[in-house]
Amino acid sequence: MQIKHIILSGLLATLFVSCTTDIAIDLNTVAPELVVDGAISTDTIVHTIYLKKTSNYFSNEAANVVSGATVTLNDGISTVTLQEDVSVKGAYHTAATYFGVVGRTYTLTIDNVDVNGDGEKERYTASCPLNAVPAIDAIAVVKGQLFYHDVWPVKLWMQDPPNVSNYYLIREYRNNVCVSDSIDEWGITSDEFFDGVYLNNETIMYFSSHKQDEMLVNGDKISLEVCGITKDYLNFIQEVKDEYRGRNPLFGGQPANIRTNIRQVLPTNATGSPRGYFAAYATSWAKTVYRTQ
Amino acid sequence: MYIYKIIIILFLLFFLTPARAITSSERVSLSGNVKDEANGEALIGVTILIKELKIGASTNNYGYYSISLPKGTYTVEYSYVGYQTVSKSVNFNTLTKLDIELKTAATEMQEVVVSSQRRDANITENTMSAQRVSINTIRKMPALMGEVDLLKAVQLLPGVVSAGEGTSSFSVRGGGIDQNLIILDEAIVYNASHMMGFFSVFNNDAIKNMTLYKGDIPATYDGRLSSLLEVQMKDGNSKKFSGSGGIGLISSRLTLEGPIFSDKTSFIISARRTYADLFLKLSSDEKIKNNQLYFYDLNAKLNHRIDDNNRIFISAYLGQDVFKNKDAGFNFGNSTLTGRWNHLFSQSLFSNFSVNYSSYNYGLSSNLSNESNFDWKYKMQDISLKADFTYFISPQNTMKFGYTTTLHNLKPGTITSTGGTTSYNTYTLPDNNAFEQAIYLSDEYQLSKRFSVKAGLRLTGFSSIGSGTVYRYDNNYNAIDSTVYKAGEVIKTYYRLSPRMGISYQLDDKSSVKANYARTNQFLQMASNSTAGTPLDLWFTAGKNVKPQTCDQYAVGYFRNFFNNALEASAEIFYKDMRNTIDFRDHAQLLLNQKLDGELRFGKSRAYGIEMQVQKNIEKLTGWISYTYSRAERTIQGVNNNETYLAPYDRPNSFYIVGNYELNEHLSFGANFIYATGQPVTYPIARMEIGGIIVPVYSKRNEYRMPDYHRLDVSLTWKPLSKKKRLWTGEWNFSVYNVYGHKNAWAINFVDDPENAYKTKAEMTYLFTFVPSITYNFKF
């Protein structure tokens, strides 16, 4: 629940006076594994799947990409092949006319790769159903304060479908540029606390004065993207945030690997495991212009 | 079948006695109460010895003792650490009641201990794995921020490790932090921490005695696998009105005690509050000015001696922690209330009846303007009735038996929303209720001068009852459906036996060998993902989806005293085999989860080790040195690919030195040195880029270790000489925590290097280095 996390981190910030220092640690290494990162939405645009490899923890350079793979996408009716980008290796695109359909299950298959370099060809697959999302009635942006700093809450008017468990991914855009572009900035919530409720002028996300690109000025065009995701994908995103944020003995859990829906099909006796997520979701958009009062 | 064997053995022991003992007409009972001469406090654990017969006994938790012996003239000796031994020559021809008052030894420090004294209770008593630390010892120890703390002292005992820097939580013999039963005057304390664990809920000024049982837990208690920490409050000075207190950097405390009308009734009230937040109000920074950050606690007790055979006590504890700022607030606290009645049916049959209430609660709320605000309240409460009897059958035979019944009510919470324009539903987590009953019987029998044996059996019936909602889960831990239970409806009942057995063999005057077996069961545990314990921890009970945890502990020890009992040494080996161990799935969601049972994973665990200690309790230099080697591991279905991993409290080597030196009447020095192997931890072995950030890929659970922990604390206590006679006496305590400023890792995180796009590094967070403090303590 978004609010709960904000409150807890705000409270902790006022309590803790601790110090940090860098420490040298020797870590083991393992053979590279496949990392899949991409999603299909209901928008009619180019959808991209990125294939990369894991690297040693202190490798300190960009990850290696997986180039030359055969990537296909099936929606239960037909199959398309994704084309690798000519200049950005490891990025595989659909056609610009492709769009996802609510209710279908999307399966991604990756062939013709040898990620761990042992000479044996590997095959991976991942599946995700495409869930619906309600339409957004309206959004508005105002100015406010949260834990003593300036924020611009984005207010939402939307009906949550009753008797269905909905999981939402939310991103905000300022002048058509996504400011919640990295996964730790994505908003996620489930309707556990508001199933069937009409969200009426409810704060769903914040633009924060702590970030340069989020400091709004009069006339900024604001868009909100709300996606209907699966519960598993929401848990994936939450786990990525937890692992990225770090932990302390009071409020952290045990470190553990982030879940994945990527499966290795061949070879059958593989020892490593693939990582990342392939998602499918429906998207709703809304726009407004920010005006200072 | 096995139960019957135990019962038969106990009955045989019972019936053997008359054949060996002298007939009752030739036997007398010597009984009475032993008190502190200065304030009338009942003294717990005083050793009474009939020198000619070499029969001994000790006072119970209420200062009462009883020995049955043949008629004659004997010398009776009463001895207790820190007090002058009293020797009386008595002619016993009838039932004899002998109440004794002991003087503290502090005023007679120059004298060397007389050689006829026996301070060898650790050798002769058929108890092992128990540590009693006197409150005076704790008071002189160096302390974090000047707050002398009972639980911090417990963390310095062999076999115990702290769960983390600054926290009050501790692990005993590799067990979890929720496996310690903490009892204050017979009521359970669920969360014994203030301020995230930096301070415990025990105000030293109100406490009389503390005993930690690491194994060999008496049959009178059950419910936690690893230890029993029994804390007794003072009864209150029955001789004159007095008080004590202290002013420190973080908090201040005041205790008032005294008799009411006569020495039959006495009271004690202790209060303590932190005031760091009062200084915050001086700040001009708005962020800081309106924050509230404090804790307070209050201990109160009233006791009344109706007549020689009846005494009643009422004790209460109340504490709260409050954190609040403009937008959010958080509070938590404990309260306990107990009423007890000691009744002597005869000099040989002592009984105690009590009614106990304890509760633990917390609340989290948000207060943002123009927003929907939420308010979450969590509460758990216990109410129990206990009847405990001790029957002093003969000089060789003491029997204890009793009955307890408890009702547990856990309300994980209701979240309500206020303000704002969206009308949120109220989110309720189902209640968790349970009803528990237990009976126990234990007997301690001195078979010969050297050989003593004890056996005990406790039978507990634990029922998870409604009102409540129980979910059913499939093999993938997904909730399938749920059943709603009405209030009082039984959901699931478990019966568990806890047998206990111990033998003690005295090799000679100075040494003994002991062995012990105990089975303990745990029906309530904490759902906590963190290693240190947090105020938001919630407790849950055994029930339809959760079996009670069980532990079988075996221990063997060798005890030897040197230099005429001035030095006590011991070495103990233990092995614990635990079943139905509970752990949580990776990334478990424990807070606000209606389907909490689906986050649990079960398996088994074990722990073993050796504890060695040398202790000196008399003369100018006192303290102890201990070394413990201890291992603990778990194998849980659904965690770490079902492979065995190190338990969070596997700390192979821990070494503690605790010392206090009384230079003269006015000056004493204290020092603690702690060294412990670092906690097991999970580190990354690779990394991946996803969604524009870099995240770790981890090794198997707990494959690595944090850096070793060590620090040195020192303190100086100065009691200034005063030429005038003053109304009060005072002393200054100067303390430095972590003198050489070793940066002890509190958490290690793997983070992005802010300067370099693709660079990551390991960053260690540490809390306290070189923290000096001053406290002024006074007494009147």
Image (cartoon, rainbow, N blue to C red):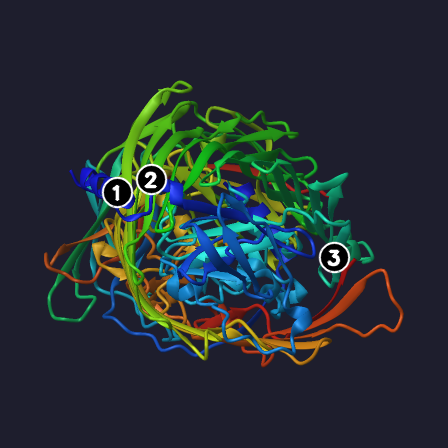
| Residue in view at x 10 percent, y 59 percent | A269
Indicate the amino acid at tag 1.
Leu
- Whether residues under marks 3 and 1 lie with C-beta atoms below 8 angstroms apart, the answer is no
- Whether residues under marks 2 and 1 lie with C-beta atoms below 8 angstroms apart, the answer is yes
Label 2 sits on a secondary structure element that is: strand
Chain holding disc 3: B
Q: Which mark is residue B441?
A: 2
Q: Which mark is first along the chain, 1 or 3?
A: 1
Residue B360 x/y as whole percent: 54, 39
Distance between mark 3 and mark 1 Cα atoms: 49 Å
| Residue in view at x 65 percent, y 75 percent | B109
Q: Residue furthest right?
A: B724
Q: Quadrant of residue A133?
A: top left
- Whether residues under marks 3 and 2 lie with C-beta atoms below 8 angstroms apart, the answer is no
Distance between mark 2 and mark 1 Cα atoms: 9 Å
**Left or right: residue B372 compared with residue B533:** right
**Left or right: residue B355 compared with residue A124:** right
**Left or right: residue A163 compared with residue B779:** left
Residue A289 x/y as whole percent: 64, 41
A5 or B82: nearer the viewer: B82
Chain holding disc 1: B
Residue that mark 3 sits on: B245
**Left or right: residue A226 compared with residue B396:** right
Residue B58 x/y as whole percent: 47, 54
Residue B569 x/y as whole percent: 40, 73
B41 or B691: nearer the viewer: B41
B592 or B680: nearer the viewer: B680
| Residue in view at x 48 percent, y 47 percent | B93
Residue that mark 1 sits on: B10
Label 1 sits on a secondary structure element that is: helix
For disc 3, the neighbor class at 10 Å (few under 14, some 14 to 19, many from 20) is many
